[in-house]
Image (cartoon, coloured by chain):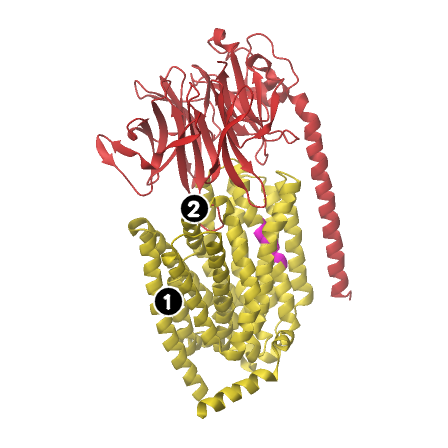
Amino acid sequence: MIKPNRIFALLCTVSAITLAAYILLARTRSADNTAGAPKSVASPATGSTPPASAEADGAKAGEHATPGEVAPDNDQNKTSKQIFFRYNGADSHFGQLAFAPYERLDQPRFIENLSCEAAYVARGRGICLAANRGLFTTYAAKLFDAKTFKIIAEFPLNGVPSRCRMSSDGKLAALTVFISGHGYESVSFSTQTLLIEVDSGRIIADLEKYSVSRDGQNFSNKDFNFWGVTFTPDARHFYATLSTNQQHFLVKGDIANASAAVVHENVECPSLSPNAARIAYKKRFIAGGRVFWQLHILDLATGRETALSEKRSVDDQLEWLDNGHVLYSLPESVSSASTNIWLAAIDGASAPRLFLKKAYSPSMASLP
Amino acid sequence: MYRLEWIERRKLEASAISPADQVAKVSPVVWKLGWTSFLTDISSEMVNSALPLYLVIHLHQSPFQYGAIDGVYNGFAVVLLSLASGLIADRSKRHKEVALTGYGLSAICKLAMLAAGGVWGWLIVITGLDRIGKGIRTAPRDALISLNTPPNLMASAFAVHRTLDAGGSLLGPLVAFILLAQLPGAFDVLWVTSFLFAILGVAALWLYVPGPKAGLFPRPFLEERRISRRSLSVLLTSPHFVALMVCGLFLSVGTANDGFIYLVLLKKGDTNSGFLPLFYVATAASYALFSIPAGICADRFGRRSIFLGGYAVLGIIYSLLLYMPAVGLPGQAGCLFLLGLYYAGTEGVLMAMASAAVPPEMRATGLAILATAIAMGKAVSSLLFGWIWVAYGVHSAIFTFGAILMAAMLAAGFCLRVIGRKRSND
């Protein structure tokens, strides 16, 4: 009979070796990714075909897309557009804000001093929700100049960043964070959604202070949570999600009056099209005790809902590429830290296609 | 004159063994069970502390889905299983093997995290199974601690175990943090590390901890199963045990969930919720620090007074939360320090008192019943606190809980004193 001490010592050694080997494996794996990242965006994009990084994905993208089928409709705007996004390939640029001209998505530039969990850029101004990773992670919002990338203003956030948006004139920003419930025990989650004046960095509103109405009646509940703001082009109004009692309403907010009104039901993370005619959003479904979201388009004039051709569950606030196409992120694989950005046409007919690899939180920023 | 004599006698008793001896006298089996829990807690707290980050930041799951996963943690099935595991351990006298099953199940769950690769349905199943593993192992393990300890050292023995246990939950988040800082996003390395710690915990239990000695149990109980059913009814009609159970239940209803206390501290101090994990660590540190002193005092000067003293500390925390004007960093640190002290004075001491009230052949079952009663009390308390908070505001909630706690303490003090007197007369 072998002594317990010997078995235990053996087990400790085996464990230590296994762990060392696994860590080594993980290190080489991230090194591989570094080598792989440039390759994945290497195929040149040409002409007016939608960005070609999709081709690198090989079979997967090929299943969905026929080249040219979903060409963007307003060609004349494209040249002036840049796409900002959070790069999330597992290499030294992980988490950094990156941007590329629409025609050359394969050649992104990284902004070394801006690592963001989520970001948005509009009209020469940007917002970056950053994590300060120490022993205990804290978060901050950084407002920056989108040409010099100098920080205009910065303030601490009260929780884990979720969404951020800016008005198209770059004067207002909105952000949502998850507060509390971050611990191990079940204390329900709540959100905080703030509106910010970009140039001063001043918080101008907390949506929970807004007076809300539904069908003309005053509507108020202790469990109100707001998230996912999208501004109207005049930057005087916005749309957002209001959740209460497990329902999710689309509300239209009036910034000057500090008020909001319910306009539709079961809409999460709305995103208003550039022509302000439609809202792209995720619609919540529950099946088998599990929540999943399907992308839909709401026509604001008629109230008609159209499902997009994307059948996977998407938990993201969409971004409009133009009035006919939307961008959204999906995890690269089920357990990956990387996400890819996909492109879908709002007609609901043509299949979605891969738009940009290892990227998250896209914003179409027209140059001022 | 009588009083002076009493003090002299106490002094004499106390000086018979020094506190250091008292700890040294705790059976090596208890220490080994403690190290098992230490390793297992490193493993499980690593996962627990990283899970929200994994789900929210890494898998881009919204916290509202995380709520669903968290809900699995408080399942009814877990309660039933822990009672069943207590009964099985007592009937078969195989406490060690039953505990091993629980520890083993949780270890396998860590490996399964790797295999699940972020698939939602599997993550829910795995966290549920992990919780079930914890439910299975707790009662037979606590029974093993008490069965290997003489009555006069009961609280010290539980204190030694809880110190190592809290030490593990202190180190777990730290290991997770170091790993993730070195290898950002490498959650698979985290699961593997956690699995290895869990395996070492299982091995420590399997290799070093003997089963309970057969000599502990009265002869007939070893053979006849029917009698164990009768002893269950004997247990449930024993005034000492029932009094402990009712007092424990009543007191736990008046105990606000840690999570709520942390939230109040965050709100009052206007602190960034990113520091919440630090609150857990600070509480665990204080718990680990005070557990052994509290256990030693309980064995020397009476478990009842230390137990009620622990709840008095909780009462102090409530009044600090109510009446402290502004909660800065020192205020928060003070409250967390006191919270650890409250745990040190109550959790292990209650198990020690219960061990004295339950005959050895029903030990695991008795401890499981007590733990279930307390879990039920906690569930009621969470619902109540949440409801009062939302409906009437946080101050009303704390005030109500202070009142419930006060009433429960008076009742418990009276009950336990009467029971204690009866026993000493017997």
- Judged from the image, the secondary structure of the residue bearing numbered disc 2 is loop
Count the numbered circles shown.
Answer: 2
The span picked out in magenta is: B39-46
Q: Along the line of sight, which residue is nearer the eye, A71 or B52?
A: B52
What is the spatial separation of the Cα atoms under label 1 and label 2, in whole angstroms? 32 Å
Q: Position of residue B177 (x, y in %)?
A: 61, 46
The answer to whether residue B111 is seen in the rendering is: no
Q: Position of residue B50 (x, y in %)?
A: 56, 45
Which color was chain A given? Answer: red
- Judged from the image, the secondary structure of the residue bearing numbered disc 1 is helix
| Quadrant placement of the C terminus of chain B | bottom left
Amino acid residing under circle 2: Asp
Prevailing SS of the magenta stretch: helix
Which color was chain B given? Answer: yellow
Q: Quadrant of residue A208?
A: top left
Residue corresponding to mark 1: B250
User: Which of the chains bears the disc numbered 2?
Assistant: B
Closer to the N terminus: mark 1 or mark 2?
Answer: 1
Q: Along the line of sight, which residue is nearer the eye, A250 or B287?
A: B287
| Quadrant placement of the N terminus of chain B | bottom left
Vertical position of residue B183 compared to residue A174: above or below = below
Amino acid residing under circle 1: Phe
Give me the residue at 55% from left, 67% from top. B291
Q: Position of residue A69 (x, y in %)?
A: 51, 11
